[in-house]
Every structure is written in structure tokens, then in C-alpha cells.
Image: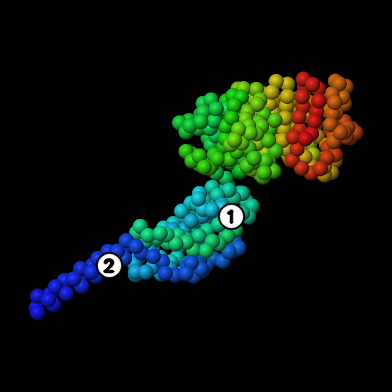
Amino acid sequence: MKKIVKSILLLTVSTFLLTSCEDEQDLKFITPAESFRIITPLTGESIVLSESNPTNPGISLTWDQPDFSTPTQIEYSVELAPVGSDFSNAQILATTSNEFVTIQSGQLNFAALVAGATPFVQSSVDIRIKATVGNSEPAYSNIITYLVTPYGCLGQFAVGAGIPSADWNWDSPVSLICDDNVLTATVTFANDTFRFFTEETVWSSGRNFPYYTDLGYKISSNFENANDGDSNFRFIGTPGVHRLKIDENQKTITAFQGSTSASSYWLVGQATPGGWSWTGNAESELGLIAPGVYEAIIRFKPDGDANFRIWLANDGTNASWGSPNRNFPSFVNDGYVIDNELINANDGDSNFKYIGPNAVRKFTVNTNTKVISVD
């Protein structure tokens, strides 16, 4: 009798241990998906981030605890992704075993910019919580849309056959340095394709030609959509050294030939962003994009007199007023055909007058064909 009881006891213990092992390997959530939710913040809440306070809270999250079939410790990951995406490129902001976490402003700012947020403009990002235990299938909370106004901008990178020093690898990418939302680099271009990237070595962070045109960017005539399956940029200008600039404030991408200002003309006047001033680089550069072809992509303003003049040199100071310059009649007398959105201001100096819309325009002086155009 004792042997029978002992055998039954051993069988019971063995069964319990085996069942426990199976439970640990096959844990399942028993909480309905809709009850695993982010409590705070609510979707649609917003924050304006400040560069002067990077350690301030950027977002404080709390959420419900999901139930597993067996009591256990749950690990949570806070995921952030571009609004409306499938989270395939999600960034992990934090991991914790608590049902709450606070993300600092600086970290949130960087993540929002990587997700495509526009600096100094309220932008939407999606956030969710991922819950996991061991090798079990993860559970996901609801998704909230958080409105972030970020600051600054990210440095970017460029690689491709159109940049021979880089080619299509990450051994020596071109680095574009960001200052006040303007990214610049000196690049030697060849007539081939390339792409911009927000993260070094991360191919999925690429920004192709349509990415920018869909956002309303005006792009230098040196570039076109390669239509190569990936819609990369193709450089079609004069091969050689150019000063590349992505202006995220004015939404322009330009590439000027040469590495010094000696290769440029200059626009100064009421119709241009800097007005009648040479102070603090207020003048607008009309860069050489091909032999004899000068181009500027700027916001022309029809306000006030809306006049301006073209200078052929710039010494970097207010003394530039005495540099060689040309007004409207000087080009007409030289046989130039001038766009009908430009007329003689008849202001005593016979400057140009812009009569088009208040918009970012492509202004070109082609000294080969003797045409001045606004597109």
C-alpha cells in the first residue's frame, strides 16, 4: 500500500513539474487586446521641445498591465514610428519592467527628427508599448499619435556613384553638417546617381528625389529624378566640386559650382529675403551651376517696391555696394530675353522689379543663351 501511495505521489509531482515547464514555454496573454492600453498621454496631446532644456521631460507614459496565463515579470518597450506607418522602422525609446516611463526632451527630439518630423513645426509621431515575456509572442498596446515640435536638425549623409569619393557603400560617406536647419557640404559630383540618408549605415533611412519634391522642395537644375526604380537623385550638372546645401527652412536643395564665392553672382534688394543689406550674409547667392549659368532658389517677395539688383562680386562687407553690378536696362541693352515676371522698376536706378507671387522660385541667368528666367 505504501509503495502505491509513493508511486502516485511521484507521478503527481512529475506531472506538475512537466506542466510548469510547458507553461513557461507557452505563455499566452489572456487580457483582451483592447484592454492593454496607454493611459497617458492621450492621443493628440502635444509638446514644444526646447534646445535649452534637453533633460526636461519630453513625454511621460503610463499604461495598463496585460495579463499572461501565468504570473510573471513583463518587459516593456516604448516604440516610436513615423505617423501612419506599420512600425517596421520603429525606434525603441526605453525598456522597463514598470508600467510607466519618462523620456527626456533631447532623446524625444532626436527620435522625432529621425522619424521625419520637421524642425520648429508641429509634427505627428506614433507611439505604442510592446510587452514580452521570454520567448512568448509579444503583445502591443493601442497606438497614440503625439504632436511634437522639435528643434534643430539632424546631420545627414550622401552616398552613391554620383559621389565618386563615396560610391554605394559606407566606407566614406559625405557628411552634411546642420546649422540652423541648413545642411551643407563640399562635394565632388559625377554624372550619376546618389541618395541622402538620415542615419549612417542605415539604408532604410534614405531620402530620394520624390521625398523632397512631395514636401514642396525646389531643387537645383543640377539634379533630376533618376527614375531608376529607387527614384534616386541624378547629378546632371558639370562634374566637379560643388557646394551642396539643403535648406530645410526655405525647402530648397542647391549645388553651386566651385568652392569659393568667386564663382557666384549676388542678388540684393527688397524682393529678396535679405532686403537691401549685405550684413550677416543677408544677400542671396546666385551660384554658378554650369559654365555661364547662374542660379538661385529663393523666396521672392512682391511686397513694397519688390526691386533688386544683380551684383557680380561680393567682398563680404558693406563695401560690396561699390562692386560691379547690373540693373534691368544693362541686360536688355545686351540682348537678354527677360521673364515677364520681371520688369524695370523705374525707381531712379532702373533696378529689377519682381511682380510674381510670394513664393520660393528658381531664378536663372544664362549668359550663354542670354535668358533670365523665373520658374
* Residue named by callout 1: 84
Residue 239 x, y percent position in the rendering? 62, 22
* Residue named by callout 2: 19
For label 1, the SS is loop
In this rendering, the answer to whether 229 lies above or below 52 is: above
- 350 vs 247, left or right, is right
Depth check: give the residue in front, 3 or 47. 3
In this rendering, the answer to whether 107 lies above or below 245 is: below
How busy is the neighbourhood of tag 2: few (under 14 within 10 Å), some, or many (20 plus)? Answer: few
Residue 294 x, y percent position in the rendering? 73, 27
x 61%, y 49%: residue: 118
- 230 vs 318, left or right, is left
Depth check: give the residue in front, 136 or 284. 136
Depth check: give the residue in front, 230 or 369. 230
- 55 vs 254, left or right, is left
Upstream in sequence: badge 2 or badge 1: 2
x 65%, y 26%: residue: 236
In this rendering, the answer to whether 31 lies above or below 172 is: below
Instruction: Mark yes or no: residue 349 visible.
Output: no
x 46%, y 55%: residue: 93
Corner quadrant of residue 364: top right
Q: Residue furthest bottom?
A: 1
3D distance between C-alphas at marks 2 and 1 = 42 Å
